[in-house]
Image: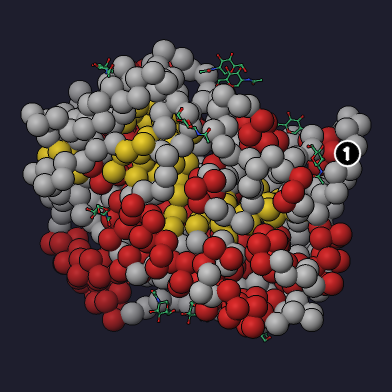
Amino acid sequence: MKLFAAVSACAASLTLCGANTIVLARNPSPEVFAAEALAGPLTALKRALPNSPSGGYAPKPVDCPANRPTIRKASSLSPNETSWLELRRNYTLDPMTSWLSRMNISGFDATSYMNGIRNNVSAVPNIGLAVSGGGYRALMNGAGFLAAADNRTNNATNTGQIGGLLQAATYVAGLSGGGWLVGSIYTNNFSSVQDLRDGSKGSSVWQFGNSIFEGPASDGIQILSTASYFSTIQDEVSTKEDAGYNTSITDYWGRALSYQLVNATNGGPSYTFSSIALEPNFQSGSIPMPFLVSDGRTPGTTIVSLNSTVYEFNPFELGSWDPTTYGFAPLQYVGSNFSGGVVPSDGSCVEGFDQAGFVMGTSSTLFNQFLLQINTTAIPQTLKNIFTDLLNDLGEDNNDIAQWQPNPFLGYNNATNRNFDSQQLTLVDGGEDGQNIPLYPLIQPQRHVDVIFAVDSSADTTYNWPNGTSLVATYQRSLNNTIENGTAFPSIPDQNTFVNLGLNNRPTFFGCNSSNITGPAPLIVYLPNAPYITLSNVSTFDPEYNDTQRDAIIRNGYEVATLGNGTLDAQWPACMACAALSRSFDRTGMKVPDQCTQCFERYCWNGTTDATPVAGNYTPAFKVGAVSLGGAAGLGVRVGMVGVVAFAVGMLLL
Ligand SMILES: *[C@@H]1O[C@H](CO)[C@@H](O)[C@H](O)[C@H]1NC(C)=O
Ligand SMILES: *[C@@H]1O[C@H](CO)[C@@H](O)[C@H](O)[C@H]1NC(C)=O
Ligand SMILES: *[C@@H]1O[C@H](CO)[C@@H](O)[C@H](O)[C@H]1NC(C)=O
Ligand SMILES: *[C@@H]1O[C@H](CO)[C@@H](O)[C@H](O)[C@H]1NC(C)=O
Ligand SMILES: *[C@@H]1O[C@H](CO)[C@@H](O)[C@H](O)[C@H]1NC(C)=O
Ligand SMILES: *[C@@H]1O[C@H](CO)[C@@H](O)[C@H](O)[C@H]1NC(C)=O
Ligand SMILES: *[C@@H]1O[C@H](CO)[C@@H](O)[C@H](O)[C@H]1NC(C)=O
Ligand SMILES: *[C@@H]1O[C@H](CO)[C@@H](O)[C@H](O)[C@H]1NC(C)=O
Ligand SMILES: *[C@@H]1O[C@H](CO)[C@@H](O)[C@H](O)[C@H]1NC(C)=O
Ligand SMILES: *[C@@H]1O[C@H](CO)[C@@H](O)[C@H](O)[C@H]1NC(C)=O
Ligand SMILES: *[C@@H]1O[C@H](CO)[C@@H](O)[C@H](O)[C@H]1NC(C)=O
Ligand SMILES: *[C@@H]1O[C@H](CO)[C@@H](O)[C@H](O)[C@H]1NC(C)=O
């Protein structure tokens, strides 16, 4: 199948594409070579690893390791995660002590409390962060939260700020648009939001003004016209097909997305998600573990519901804790011919299937719909026709899926696995079951997470604000004995209550009283998207944002996280720290400081409901005040990165 044959023809013949088009496709010009040669060593040093054995987008057979890869039961954490946690939990002690001290709970000595428990890891707070889906809106709003939580952001460790929470966290989960954020940070070697936002010369990273239809601007390292951008994507996807793998629209989508998210030539076609586990800062335990979430679609159905099997990606594994699949595959070897939980002696081992952009695309297949908007864009008709052919080829039922074939869980757990008999594992957007906040990996009892800071940028209401629907979904799922498999969750009120009581308009804590839950469950610090300084409720399907709008929404997310830099409640940082410490206080028997008691009175949902139907559309007022989108709305000083290399590359291009 050569779906993009016409693009290749275009790339091969200048006249076909118009004289103005710069066409540089398969045979890069000397300039591109020079730029890549310069960028290469840096890339190898600084990014997640471009370690696909094919050197490109396609997976490739490799020699099986001495211990052939197997699927393991989901009855415990993986040995990899267990040994990583020994490093990470220890590594969080100092950042957590410093963060708790800065949050300044009155009458509480954070340093002596932490010193008292540092040799007893199970007493130490175990912190998870979760960033919801919702396209670019979720990426940007979630980015504002992560920037506020990151001690590397300018001013984030000043009084009234919450920087350092990220450094104290054990886990960071993202889904769909939130997965683009988490994926972008981790494939770029745990870059800060500030650095990704400010970008660097010649990089198209986070340049959302150039939509995925156009591709990156034609300057710097990535010299691409729209036509050559499409033909490069087509060539890459066909290498996977030529290697014998089925491809789906998600391959194209993931590739296009990567140009914006992965700071490497052509969006880093050979970068794998499992390579995050090989980065020194991850291996040493100095950064949190990332998760991405997807839903499984049962063969022969197109319905994804709350009882669908949920899958998590982490740097070590892909799998599910649900009683259905109840197994995990080593991510590095997904693509191998697993059968019955092993790669049989006549089966080959494969690496490179877990391409980073493909994983991010898998968590966000809902946005395959972006590609359906292609007719409304200005790109050449030839390209539109090709996409239309592609879509027709796939058939409507499969427009929004990611095909993971071979299915690693083939013949595994036949009694309960819904895909045991299927050659392909069909994965879809992690928010399609209604659980748009990726809480799933964080509420697994094996992980013992104490508190989840959950950023919700869902578009539940008519005007794209959240109304608690995602928390309601996770709560409902936790009540279904056939699917919950040991995951307890705090009780959550209905959406009318959320809106009537304003629980979707300010931070709210759920599950403050750990004894009022059916099992061990984290405290949820719910951080809903709301208008602090700009209307951050942009449409989920808007594919294009200029830098001013992007920066304003990131800034708004920062204000969500800090309650308007503390202007709405000067005690907010202390209250966040109280939430982080709550379960630890339960375990150590520590008397809850008075300021924490006051915080809990203010922020904990106390069980009150008001299910009166909400009349009219929910239109929240500005909480701080609108900023002008005419001026700069940055987090700090914007840095124009013109390093020696960028300069040298620029010279070569002249
Ligand atoms: C995970 O653990 C296995 C078994 O100990 C080991 O062979 C493998 O290298 C580990 N993977 C990573 C990415 O550390
Ligand atoms: C714990 O971390 C500290 C530095 O934060 C390090 O010096 C120490 O060796 C670590 N201990 C273990 C057991 O890893
Ligand atoms: C951020 O926290 C990490 C971990 O504690 C520390 O090593 C680093 O120096 C801090 N950076 C800043 C800018 O404070
Ligand atoms: C992008 O990659 C280049 C080359 O490796 C590097 O110099 C630059 O700092 C990176 N930019 C960002 C925002 O990470
Ligand atoms: C609970 O989950 C099972 C299996 O996943 C499903 O068949 C059942 O309908 C669900 N029950 C409710 C009340 O949703
Ligand atoms: C999920 O639950 C619904 C009812 O809530 C049921 O109709 C459906 O069959 C269930 N699906 C599976 C795969 O169990
Ligand atoms: C989870 O599901 C598996 C597989 O069905 C089962 O063996 C296990 O006991 C369940 N765990 C809990 C805590 O219910
Ligand atoms: C684009 O427009 C053409 C002709 O108007 C139509 O046949 C095609 O289905 C459209 N493509 C998509 C993806 O909607
Ligand atoms: C599980 O199902 C596979 C595929 O249908 C089959 O080949 C295998 O024999 C079954 N295994 C068991 C233990 O029943
Ligand atoms: C909340 O959002 C859900 C999902 O979009 C919607 O069906 C419901 O009407 C909303 N309710 C309120 C009160 O906003
Ligand atoms: C305590 O649990 C009950 C259900 O068991 C629930 O109705 C109530 O709202 C919970 N209270 C709080 C504060 O969560
Ligand atoms: C950073 O903090 C300094 C000192 O408090 C202040 O003058 C400056 O305006 C702050 N910058 C930003 C971008 O908030």
Residue 1 spot, x, y in % from top left: 20, 23
* Residue furthest out toward the front: 589
Residue 132 spot, x, y in % from top left: 58, 46
Left or right: where 464 falls relative to 421: right
Residue 623 spot, x, y in % from top left: 82, 59
Asked if residue 480 is positioned above or below residue 551 in the image, the reply reads above
Q: Secondary structure at mark 1?
A: loop
Residue 494 spot, x, y in % from top left: 79, 34
- Name which residue lies at 54% across and 46% down: 445
The foreground one among 100 and 460 is 100
Left or right: where 555 falls relative to 275: right
Identify the image quadrant of the C terminus.
bottom left
- Name which residue lies at 68% across and 36% down: 475
- Name which residue lies at 45% across and 49% down: 291
The foreground one among 303 and 135 is 303
Residue wearing tag 1: 609
Q: Is mark 1 within 8 Å of ligand 11?
A: yes
- Name which residue lies at 69% across and 47% down: 537
Asked if residue 584 is positioned above or below residue 182 in the image, the reply reads below
Residue 134 sits in which quadrant? top right
